[in-house]
Amino acid sequence: MRVYTGEHIRNVAVLGHGACGKTALVDALAFVAGTTKRHGSVKDGTALTDYTPDEIERKYSISLGLAYAEWMDTKINFIDTPGYLDFAGDAVAGVWAADAGLIVVSATGSVEVGTEQVFQYCEDRGLPCMFYVSLMDKEHASFNRVVDDIKSKLTAKVVPVEVPIGEGSDFRGIVNLITGKALLFKKGTKTGESDEAPPPPELKAQVEQYTQNLIETVATTNDALLERYLAGETIAKDDLVRAMHLGVDNGELVPLLCGSAELTYGSRVLLTELVELMPAPTERPAIEVKTWGEMKPIVLTAKDDGPFVAQVFKTVSEPHVGDVTYFRVISGVVANGAEVFNAPRDSMEKLNHLSVGLGKDRIEVPSLHAGDIGVVAKLRNTHTDDTLSTAAVPVALPRIPFPDLIITLSIDVKTRGEEDKLSTGLHRLSEEDPTFHSEFNPELGQTLVRGRGERHLEIIAGRLARKFGVHSTLGKPKVAYRETLKGKAEGQGKHKKQSGGRGQYGDCWIRVAPLPRGSGFQFVDEIVGGVIPRQYIPAVEKGIIDALPKGPVAGYPMVDIKVELYDGSYHDVDSNEMSFKMAGILAFRNVTPHARPILLEPIAEVEALTPDEHLGAVMGDLSSRRGKILGSEPNGKLTKLKALVPEAELDRYATALHSVTHGRGTYRQKFHGYQEAPPEVTAKVVEAHKKELEAAEKK
């Protein structure tokens, strides 16, 4: 295919709530432009950018996909992103790699939680946007409802550029407000062909209203245009388009178009407006960074004569291929087969078979210019969020702000002996997906996986089975309880063993007492008169430390305890360090049950973000989880609610919050500390511990 320079490229992240029609739209645009020869369908599993087994089976996007359309001497790179919040990491990555956002809003569903989220991503990134009202041919479609919803919930800067002719099954055309012409689509059209006609009389008032609004909005972004408008002059189409282009790039207005991807209605106009109104990479702001190591300031722009710098925004592991790397060229030109430098990893990489992405296919190209998006396979030591540059000008770009991980589950193999394969697979998947993390917790004896939601982790488990042959189960993670004391006690620990010849003898007396929360463990030597020789006192301390991990309540580690060693005895021949270590263990186990031991449960500090109308429901839900509400405060359009909640009560909380807020609530949590568990909780934990011991004995 042809190689394009920056001014002839548009990088567009296609964003929106799940099931709003993003993937179908990308497929239709590529087909209408002639990039692909087949008009695919999400329902049939043939959509261009939904090609993985998971996506075909579930019929929604899980990972971002790449496609392109060549239109009006321009290459439009489409980054098709997932709509569900579980996979928001790829939506953020898509926004980071793009120069503009095409936000798809369903004509039947209007603005939803995912729409709000992706619009916020674009706002945070300073990305120019365009709205596209999809599914205009479906039952209950309402163009005006969507426009009003966008104005009230997202931005007042939205400006319709088109008005639909008919809605639902009657949708048959659009009126383009820039040209003033109606486009009537031909029934059975494959690629969105249409006939021009005057706007229908029944739409005259609406067209006039929206046209006036469009011209007034555009004119206010350009002083010269405003003077001409106020003087009553007719503004030519080319002048209007140029002003709109600048207004979009500056964030002063957000155009809105409409159509049906399934019928390809409106696809040609959308392609044209993406070229005319969206900014090229060369028009976007420069990036100020510092070179790796020497920390010299450098300004990067999308120009071919700059140093080569590219950012990796996605890594995919493909069967029989290995890792496939998606990257955006920030500056400079790179040729097929070039050697580049990954500065933070101190690694050279060779870009063999340099390509552009088209769904599951890769189209090889001789080079990529500044601003373009490329794909390369089999890099040795490069992962998502890495920067590729040159050894002469090594650079590390700011990292992509991937969203927080919000759910933790345990994972275990179904077949014994596959633990190593599980570990390898999880490691590979975490390199592929920055919003997924795994670790083995030795205290709990569990492998824990963290992600964006239950659906996200279920997909991970499915990939483990398909890619690595590891069948696993997801479960509730154990809770890292602790134990401590509320009272004081003292007693003896004696280890005496005689089996012929030299025996073993160690005898110590200890006092135990609680310490303030967070103090840890304190050992005090109160031995006087040499009742225990000095060389054996460290052995007693070591024995007590070895006994700390299994408390008397339910076998959890003990904390915040003071132990005084105050008396004991020894044998000239039979005493040794091991004997006194055993004596220390016995003393601790004998004494602590008499010092009012208690169970401590971990407490999390939770920050939940919710719309005001759901604040009461969120507070009620947290209270039912034994949460202590600390207060609330405004946070943009939402309210931030702070609470202290036992970690044991937060299992699957993300799902519950999603339910009570109708998908609009999010939260984050961090460890706060430990506090005494209520008697009923302690009783449940003790009972569960007994059952574990019984099960272990049976094995």
Image (tube, rainbow, N blue to C red):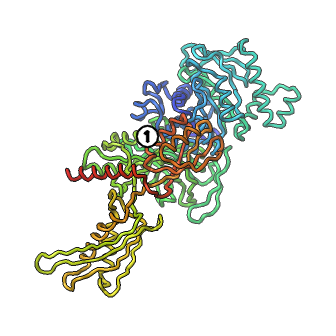
Q: Is residue 354 visible?
A: no
Q: Position of residue 296 (x, y in %)?
A: 63, 63
31 and 41: which one is in front? 41
- Residue occupying image coordinates x 72% and y 12%: 202
Q: Position of residue 141 (x, y in %)?
A: 59, 20
516 and 188: which one is in front? 516
The amino acid type found where label 1 is placed reads Glu
- Residue occupying image coordinates x 49% and y 49%: 645
- Residue occupying image coordinates x 48% and y 40%: 86
Q: Residue furthest left?
A: 500
253 and 79: which one is in front? 253
Q: Is residue 269 depicted above or below 15 in this figure?
A: above
Q: Residue furthest right?
A: 231
Classify 10 Å Cα crowding around label 1: few (below 14), some (14-19), many (20 and above).
some
Q: Residue furthest top?
A: 201
Horizontal side of residue 415 vs 38, given as left or right: left
Secondary structure state at the residue bearing disc 1? helix
- Residue occupying image coordinates x 60% and y 13%: 170
Q: Which residue, given by chain and number where applicable, does mark 1 sit on?
A: 454
